[in-house]
Image (tube, rainbow, N blue to C red):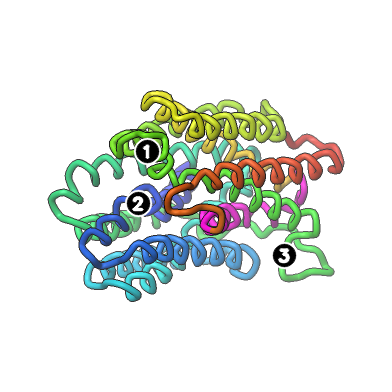
Amino acid sequence: MSQAIACLSLGVTSLLMAGVLPALLGALADEHRLNAAGIGLTATFEALTMGIITGVSSVWLPPKRLKLIATIALLSLAVADFATTILSGVSVMAVRAFAGLPEGILLWITVGMIARTVTPERWAGVFFTAMVSAQFVIAILYALWVLPDFSANGGFIGLALASVVGLLAVPFLPRAFAPLARSPDDPTGAPPPRGWFALFATLIFVAGTSVVGVFLQPLAHEAGLATTVSNNALWVSLAAQIPGGLVATALAGRVRYLTIFTVSTVVYIASWLVFLVHPPGWMFISANAVAGFVGVLFAPFLVPMAIEADPSRRAAVQSGGTQVLAGALGPFAASFVVADNDVHGSILLGSVVVIMGLALIAGLHFTAKRNDHP
């Protein structure tokens, strides 16, 4: 149990930045260290490098010497966070892109542990619940204390200290993971065709779910609502994600993943349609909270989907990196269908893409050999 908790803590540390990303990058913009375009590029570069490294590590990096690897990754991430405090402009983008490298390694360790468990969706639910809870706490601390008193630099120093504290988990890590099954025809450990298809379905579905949220503030303005409404919607959504993770953990092994994805698709689209009808503030906040709830509800079930497609679990260990990539590609694609005074195109794009993802997942499920995976 201590080894599992240690592995999960590394993943939580790697994703702490995501919980305060809008606030930190916004603070850098307020200090004239990033422009508006730089905010989007910085977020995209860090997410892309993190996702790529997680995926590449799953194929090429032997799951050995985990304590040494984790130590180097945590220290490297701390250095990147500290370095951000003295940089601006393109230099910030570069160092945050570098930060994605150790973040990807840390997430690889967490996903590798989850993929090797008997009930991976349950452990994934525990991970997402812990991650969202940590992000919620740090977001509140940053909003009420750190950023007002210590500016953006205080925020990055806080993240650096969190990485240093993460070193306390290293002694409890396993020395290595058991190797996953490899085909004699493919000694690299890459997934088989159905495994790649599962990862593609993951990429499309998660990208679709990530399209709308990044435009929350302009959507509120176009509905005639104040900035405070969109800000409150963010905090309430983070709070709603915590019970979403708890419900996912409780449903693990009891509900088929296709059911979860179908329900999540319907709920997502229904909540997005609320944004189109110029809702009052309470309805706007509620709709975004519901979207936040299902966003964490479905995420753990991506792992059993990958395992059903590829029982060797080689695809499952790449699921985390694929989700990170999707989170970067969704908003990037949406940038082509929105304008400064009208971002409603993001709702249409998100709805179409998430339905496409559901169709891919359903096709994968109905063509699979029946087994005991949910």
Asked if the magenta segment contains residue 29, the reply would be no
Q: Position of residue 151 (x, y in %)?
A: 18, 56
Judge whether 40 appears above or below 115 on screen.
Answer: below
The residue at the far front in this view is 341
Q: Decide if residue 162 is in sight here.
A: yes
Asked if the magenta segment contains residue 317, the reply would be yes
Q: Residue at x 79, y 59 (%)?
A: 192
Q: Decide if residue 245 is in sight here.
A: no
Q: Quadrant of residue 102?
A: bottom left
Q: Residues within 10 Å of mark 2 (few under 14, many from 20)?
A: some
Q: Which mark is residue 80?
A: none
Q: Secondary structure at mark 3?
A: loop
Q: Position of residue 233 (x, y in %)?
A: 37, 34
Question: Which residue range is magenta in the image?
Answer: 308-335
**Of the residues shown, which amino acid type is indicated by label 3?**
Ala
Q: Which residue is mark 1?
A: 234
Q: Which mark is residue 22?
A: 2
| Disc on the earlier residue, 3 or 2 | 2
Whether residue 239 sits left or right of residue 315 in the image: it is left
Whether residue 141 sits left or right of residue 277 in the image: it is left
Q: Which residue is mark 3?
A: 190
**Of the residues shown, which amino acid type is indicated by label 2?**
Pro
| Disc on the earlier residue, 1 or 2 | 2
Q: Position of residue 17 (x, y in %)?
A: 37, 54
Judge whether 115 appears above or below 287 on screen.
Answer: below
